[in-house]
Image (cartoon, rainbow, N blue to C red):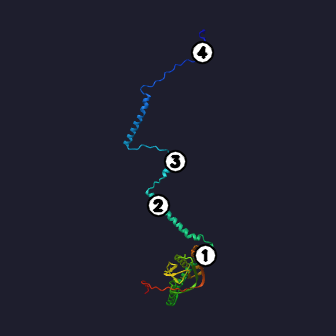
């Protein structure tokens, strides 16, 4: 190696890498200038929108609107509300509503009618059952009596005389029921003292109906005989019975079995409790002899005649 090659300049050059020539910057194509592209972009967009509107007008369709994305719960709510009911579904819904309302009314009426018995004590329930048994026994006795009468008529040697006796007895019984004959026998006296003037005609009518259901055979209210056709109305300072005005205290004289009549008035929710709620004083007294002497005039029918004549 020569001495020229080992000079300091040559040594430094040998350590440095070879020089890479710089590349010339690329010049934009003269055919597509950037300024021209930026100026042509809005015009192209307007032309595209115009062509799109023209195509939509020609086809008659509205542009598709893309709304916000809905969650699953929102889609469920939109599907259920507002409800879309057909005519058949509406008719079925109305029928089901009517059926449900009818069942509810029936259940409510049964609950009201049984409410008094549900709240009754055991002693009251036993007394009600005894009363029902007594009514059944009375009906059986009446049935047996009628069968005995038929047997006597069939077996009697003098059927005409026996028939006459039974006819007289039947006339007496019917006279008691019709109020044309006085009657006496065991029974009760029901007194209602209405000092507040709150007792109305329908309350007294309930008492009469309850006594009849308990087996009362003759009833007299003050001086008026109660029969099958008796009616009660409200009047000034009292009550009218068959057009006859009566005033408090109201006194019922009733012939029947005292053991049946008194419990019927004292059942839970019955006549006595209803009158006491109206602040009336009610007393029931049993007696071995009650006289019902108020009579009703016999009314001759205008058109009806006996079929035997």
* Residue drawn 49% across the image and 63% down it: 99
- Say if mark 1 contacts mark 4, CB within 8 Å: no
Residue 94, disc: 2
As measured in the structure, the alpha-carbon distance from the residue carrying label 2 to the one carrying label 3 is 32 Å
Residue 251, disc: none
Q: Nearer the viewer, mark 1 or mark 4?
A: 4
Category of crowding for the residue at label 2, using alpha-carbon neighbours closer than 10 angstroms: few (below 14), some (14–19), many (at least 20) = few
Q: Nearer the viewer, mark 3 or mark 4?
A: 4
In this view of the protein, which residue sits in the foreground, 208 or 159? 208
As measured in the structure, the alpha-carbon distance from the residue carrying label 2 to the one carrying label 1 is 46 Å
Residue 12, disc: 4
At mark 3, the secondary structure is helix
Q: Which residue is mark 1?
A: 127
Quadrant location, the C terminus: bottom left
As measured in the structure, the alpha-carbon distance from the residue carrying label 4 to the one carrying label 2 is 108 Å
Q: Earlier in the sequence, mark 2 or mark 3?
A: 3
């Amino acid at each position: 190696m020569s001495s020229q090659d080992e000079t300091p300049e040559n040594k430094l050059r040998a350590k440095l890498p070879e020089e890479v020539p710089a590349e010339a910057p690329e010049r934009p194509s003269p055919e597509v200038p950037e300024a021209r592209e930026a100026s042509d972009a809005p015009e192209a967009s307007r032309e595209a929108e115009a062509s799109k509107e023209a195509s939509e007008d020609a086809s008659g369709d509205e542009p598709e609107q893309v709304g916000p994305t809905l969650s699953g719960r929102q889609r469920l709510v939109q599907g259920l509300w507002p409800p879309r009911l057909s005519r058949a579904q509406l008719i079925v819904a109305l029928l089901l509503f009517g059926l449900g309302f009818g069942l509810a009314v029936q259940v409510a009426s049964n609950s009201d009618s049984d409410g008094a018995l549900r709240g009754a004590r055991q002693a009251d329930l036993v007394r009600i059952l005894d009363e029902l048994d007594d009514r059944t026994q009375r009906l059986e006795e009446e049935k047996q009596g009628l069968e005995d009468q038929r047997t006597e008529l069939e077996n009697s040697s003098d059927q005409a005389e026996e028939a006459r006796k039974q006819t007289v007895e039947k006339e007496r019984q019917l006279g008691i029921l019709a109020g044309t004959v006085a009657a006496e026998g065991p029974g009760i006296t029901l007194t209602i003292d209405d000092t507040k003037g709150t007792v109305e005609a329908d309350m007294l009518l309930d008492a009469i109906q309850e006594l009849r259901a308990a087996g009362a055979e003759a009833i007299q209210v003050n001086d008026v005989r109660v029969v099958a056709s008796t009616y009660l109305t409200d009047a000034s300072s009292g009550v009218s019975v068959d057009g006859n005005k009566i005033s408090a205290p109201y006194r019922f004289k009733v012939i029947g079995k005292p053991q049946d009549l008194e419990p019927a008035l004292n059942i839970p929710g019955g006549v006595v409790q209803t009158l006491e709620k109206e602040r009336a004083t009610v007393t029931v007294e049993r007696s071995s002899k009650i006289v019902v002497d108020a009579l009703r005039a016999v009314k001759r029918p205008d058109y009806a005649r006996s079929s035997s004549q």
